[in-house]
Image: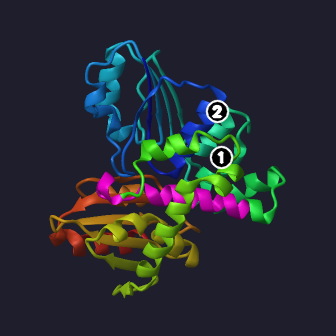
Amino acid sequence: MYFDIFNGDGDGICALHQLRLAEPQPEAVCITGVKRDIKLLAKPELAETEDAMITVLDVSLDSNRDGLLELLARNNTIQYIDHHAAEPIPDNPLLTAHIDLSADTCTSLIVNKLLSDRFAAWAVCGAYGDNLHVQAEKLSASLGLKELQINSLREIGELLNYNGYGADIADLHFEPAELYRAVSKYTDPLAFHSESPELGRLRDGFRNDMERAMAVREYPNTGKNRLYFFPDEAWARRVSGVFANLKAREKMDAAHALITENSDSSLRISVRAPLNDKRDAVQLCKQFPTGGGREAAAGINSLPAEMLDQFIEKFNSTYP
């Protein structure tokens, strides 16, 4: 059997699409979920899997270590490509790991390097989705793309990424595996941009959600860092990642935190390190329950509300 296990955001989808354009595997079982549903190697579908070929993309090895070790123990061959926390990487002949923890890369760019730029335009989409605009623009320039084409790739990446955010599948416009299947019909992302009905639906949803988000005022904070507090509503969960990325680009010397209420009164937090100093976001978030991520962008899935002041204090001290 074959399994493709991937983060349900823009980077995960674009990374897998590049791989499957290069190495088609139509019988692969897709396992994914909302962006923060990252413990994918512990899914019930894999509970008794053995002697399978498994590709894992854009989910933290640290968060999936137990599941990974169990799968390796059952003689599964695993290719693991990612840019999140992953130390130490297990030493096992069944595991091939391509993991780069640099704050200036993403899984789509790692796959692009492995494929020697064969489907680099999709890597541009993935990089834009992960808010790596400088890297996306450099790769676009190397491909000789025009401004209108680059803008189209940026919109693809940002809209695919937008669809990944939510507390559960019900918050999303499309289930991520369904959206991947829509993308997989296209070799050329510019054709996907002009023809895809799914992208049109995402565009309309994004426009409506962003109108609400832009009306949210800054949450009180001292210093240059910015905080935003969003309500427990589906639109707020959907737009949280793209909104945080937008604000980070607006003020590149500041750190940003987007705080969203969960239905159980806990708080979901998205952190963006300053784009001019991309460090320590994952270290900050891992100090709290359910925290994780990477150097430039991280989050906390369920912060007890009584710990908010403690989080803000550590947030500001991490980025003084």
Please state the horizontal and vertical placement of residue 157, each as a whole percent of the image. Answer: 58, 56
Count of marks, rendered view: 2
Q: Secondary structure at mark 1?
A: helix
Q: Amino acid at mark 2?
A: Leu
Against 46, residue 247 (above or below) is: below
Frontmost residue, 29 versus 9: 29
* Left or right of residue 298, residue 233 in this image: left
- Checking the image for residue 21, the label placed there is 2
Q: Overall secondary structure of the magenta stretch? A: helix
* Left or right of residue 69, residue 126 in this image: right
Q: What crowding class fits label 1: few (fewer than 14 Cα within 10 Å), some (14-19), or many (20 or more)?
A: many
Q: What crowding class fits label 2: few (fewer than 14 Cα within 10 Å), some (14-19), or many (20 or more)?
A: some
Is residue 155 covered in magenta?
yes
Determine if residue 218 is in view. yes
Give the residue at mark 1: 122
Q: Secondary structure at mark 2?
A: helix
Q: Quadrant of the C terminus?
A: bottom left
Residue at horizontal 70%, vertical 64%?
151
Query: Dots 2 and 1: beta carbons under 8 Å?
Result: yes
Residue at horizontal 39%, vertical 64%?
238
Among the 4 quarters of the image, the one containing residue 223: bottom left
- Checking the image for residue 134, the label placed there is none
Is residue 203 covered in magenta?
no
Against 69, residue 42 (above or below) is: below
Q: Give me the C-alpha separation between circle 2 and circle 1.
A: 10 Å
* Left or right of residue 301, residue 99 in this image: right
Please state the horizontal and vertical placement of residue 74, each as a whole percent of the image. Answer: 32, 14
Please state the horizontal and vertical placement of residue 52, each as a whole percent of the image. Answer: 41, 16
Residue segment shown in magenta = 150-171
Please state the horizontal and vertical placement of residue 189, each as a whole percent of the image. Answer: 67, 49
Frontmost residue, 188 versus 244: 188
Q: Quadrant of the N terminus?
A: top left
